[in-house]
Each structure stands twice: as structure tokens, then as C-alpha cells.
Image (spheres, coloured by chain):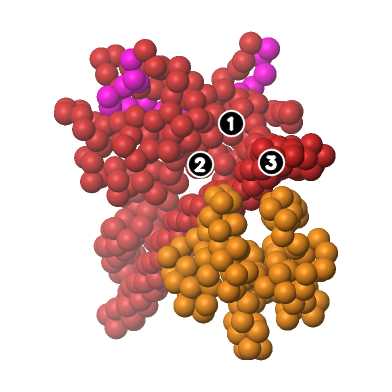
Amino acid sequence: MKVLSKLQRYGLAVISCGVALALAGPIDAPSSCFLLAVTVSGLFGGLGPNLLSVALSALAFAYFFLGRPSPPARESTSLLRFAAFLAAILLVTVLMEIKRRAEESRSRSEEALRQAHAELAHANRVTTMGELTASLAHEVNQPIAAAVTDANTCLRWLTRDHPDVEEAREAAMRMAKDATRAAEIISKVRQIFKKGAPLRELVDVNEIIREMIVLLRKELSSQSIAVRTELAADLPKLKGDRVQLQQVLMNLMVNSIDAMKNVEGKRELTIKSQRAQDEEEDEQLTVLVSDTGMGLPPQEADHIFNAFFTTKTDGTGMGLRISRSIVESHGGRLWATDNHPRGASFHLTIPTKIETHE
Amino acid sequence: MGTQEKTKLVAVVDDDELMRSALQGMLKSVGLPSQAFASAEEFLNSGQQRQTACLIADIRMPGMSGLELQAQLNAEHCRIPTIFITAHGDTKMRMQALRAGAVEFLAKPFDDEALLGSVRAALEN
């Protein structure tokens, strides 16, 4: 219903009443024809055009058809016919309006549901990351503590008055085992990020972008940041991990917002998505997240993707590192460029036909 | 690892195998006999409580936690000087452990001289 403009919708009411008028005479069925016209206007035009068609139909009906079946027409019969016709078209109008309101409230609750889902996914991700970090810290801490103890034990055997090399050797071997375990834990975590726990579903990147804008609405408006989106309607879907890709886009957008926090003048966040092809003419999509913030740190533009590199006072320096890992695990690339006169752009390309990337 | 000197046995309760070996190795290097258990339940079922002069226990373990083990021993009127070592040492947990009679509460990775100091103090009492 949103496809028609206001003018078109009222035009539809006028035209359908005109067609009804033209047909009503020849086939001698004015009530049915006008009822049909009112129904069509109500169904496709909305309440305004519906009421307009009611008025037009009533006028036309009264003017052209009410007196016609003369001579035996009596005043009271004519009035009754008119009343019945009026009742019918008003009933149609009311029914249409009820239907429309029901649909509107349904789409509103669907929107609310979608937003609740998005927020839940966000909360879940935050919790999962927190839990992952805590359990990772615990897991790694354990073998490190053991290694420290074993190293001290080894030293104690060696620095005795009569050094016990055999015991020292055993302690050193335990130490090697401890360190190996710590390394194994780290490599397990890296694999989780690399392979992304092979969750591959069809993902609509435009939809993710819209969701993230909804999620960040509060931050955007409180920082007076205007959002401009140019999302390609023909953007191909890609096979990937929806939550991870949400994380990447969320991270890039939050970075942009943070970069504009202390900047005077125009604050604009631009997000574009495009269909593209790589050198081998394989289909891929590109996303550009661009801001008018403070730009990339001079001389250190290459370092922003390094782990623990941050320009924020409360940053972990993990966001871009993890984002790049995720994009690479989808077979894609993530890089940054400076904007002129100011700001930074993050470019992301991901092939839409993915071969699992090891 | 033997129990030749019954009254001086140190029990180690930790679910992590590397940690158990490290602690036993450390105790051996200073000449203290020890016995290791992979869980609080295993320790309670071993019947070694009465021979244990000092207990070194992890707090977070699958099954019964270190603090629950301590409570259970207290309920059995089996007061063993206990040293807790844990990766998540928050103040509240620490206070709870010390109030229930723990002699020391160390965060991993710990200073083994501090741990040995506490073990020796516990054995002398």
C-alpha cells in the first residue's frame, strides 16, 4: 500500500468511481458497480480515498440512478434503495478501516519483536564475550601458575647444597608441559575466531546494517550524528556467521561514533553497501563505513588492526583485530583509509560464494 | 608422597592435574610428604582427613567447591589448617574463607615462598 503516492491513491478513488459510473448504466447494476469501486479504493487507497469514493458514489448514485426506474418509482422506495446502498458502502469502509488498523498494529508488534530480537542478540553477544574472556583468563592462568611453581621448584633443587639434577629435570619437564598447555589454550581460542565455529547461514548484510543503526540510535542522536545509508537493493546474500558479522559492523560503527565525539562541525556517518566483483570476476559485496571524525592516527594507520592498539582511553585494542579476523574467516578483507578533508573510511569486502577458508 | 610421618601429611586438593603435580613437586623439594586429590569428594572419601596436618585447596572445582569442603570438615569437627589458592580471589570470598578458619588465601599464580611459609606455620601448630 505504501507504493502508491497520496495523489495516486485519491486518483484511484476518482477513477474507480468513474469506471463504475460508466459501467453502471449499460449493465443496469449501479449498486454493485459503486460498491466495487468503494471496495477497490478502500483496499488500495486507505481511509481518505475510501471516504472520497463513498461521497462520489453516493452523489453519482443519487443523481443518475435514483429517479430512473420511473414511472412507478415512489419517493419512499427510492429513499430506501439509497439508504441500503449507503449502508453497504459505509459498511465496506468500516470493515476496510478495521482491517487496516489490525494490519498496522501487527506490523508494529512485528517491528517491536524484531528490535527485541536484535537487542537480545546484542546482549547475548556481550555476555558471551565476557564469559569467554573470564573463562579464558582462568584457563590460561592455571598452567601459568603451575609453571611458576615448577620453575621455583626446579631452582630449589639446583641451588641446594647438593643439587639434585634428576629432581630438577623432572620439575623442568613439568614446566614444559605447563607452557605447552597454555599455548594449546591460546591456539584453541584462535581457532574459534578463525573458523567461527562453522556457523554458516544465509545472511542479508543490508538487514544487519539496518539493525545496527536501530541499536545505536540512542548513541547517534545523543552525539548529533546524521546517518546516511546507500544500501544496494540488489546486494547478494552471503553465507556466514550472522552474529559475527553483526559484531564487525557494530564495532566499525561504534568506532566511527567514538571518533566523532570530540570533533567540531559536521558529524556524519555514511554506510554504503554495493555488489561488486573481484579480480577473478567472482561475486562479492563491499561495505563502506565512513565518518567525519578525527581520522586515522598519523604514521600509525597500519597499526590500528594490531591487537592491543587503541587510541581510546577505555579501549581494549581488540575490536579491529577481532573484526579483521572475522572478515578474513569469511574469505574477505577489511582495511582503512583516510578521508578528505577529515575522518576515516573502513572498507570491507566479502565474497558471496564462499569456499571455507582455513 | 608417602604417609610415613602421619602427623605431617600435607593434602593437596585441586582439579587441575598440572597444578597438583606442581604443588607436590614443590612440597617434595622442601622435604614435605604430600598426597594429592582431584576433588573435594575424593579427599573426604579417602579417610585421610584425620592424618592431614595441612590442606592446600583450590576454591573453584567441579562438584564440591573448596569453601564447601572447608564447611564440611568444620561440620565433622575436623579442623585442618587450610590454605586456599584460587584464580578468582575476590575480597568477599577471601573474608568468608578466613572467617571459616582458613590460614591463608592466595591468588594464582602465587609466591611459593609465601605458600611454603604458611604450610610450615600450619605444621608447627
Rendered shade, chain B: orange
Q: Name the subunit of mark 3.
A: A
Which numbered tag is attached to residue A247?
2
Query: Looking at the image, which is closer to me, B54 or A43?
Result: B54
Q: CA distance from mark 2 to mark 1?
A: 12 Å
Rendered shade, chain A: red
Query: In the rendered image of this protein, does residue A304 appear above or below residue A24?
Result: above
Residue sitting at x 36%, y 71%:
A94
Query: In the rendered image of this protein, does residue B70 appear above or below residue A184?
Result: below
Query: In the rendered image of this protein, does residue B61 appear above or below residue A346?
Result: below
Please give left or right for residue B45 compared with residue A123 in the image.
Answer: right
Please give left or right for residue A289 compared with residue A56 in the image.
Answer: right
Query: Looking at the image, which is closer to me, A325 or A173?
Result: A173
Q: Name the subunit of mark 1.
A: A
Where residue A304 appears, x then y in whole percent?
43, 24
Q: Amino acid at mark 2?
A: Gln
Q: Is the Cβ of the residue at disc 2 closer than 8 Å to that at disc 3?
A: no
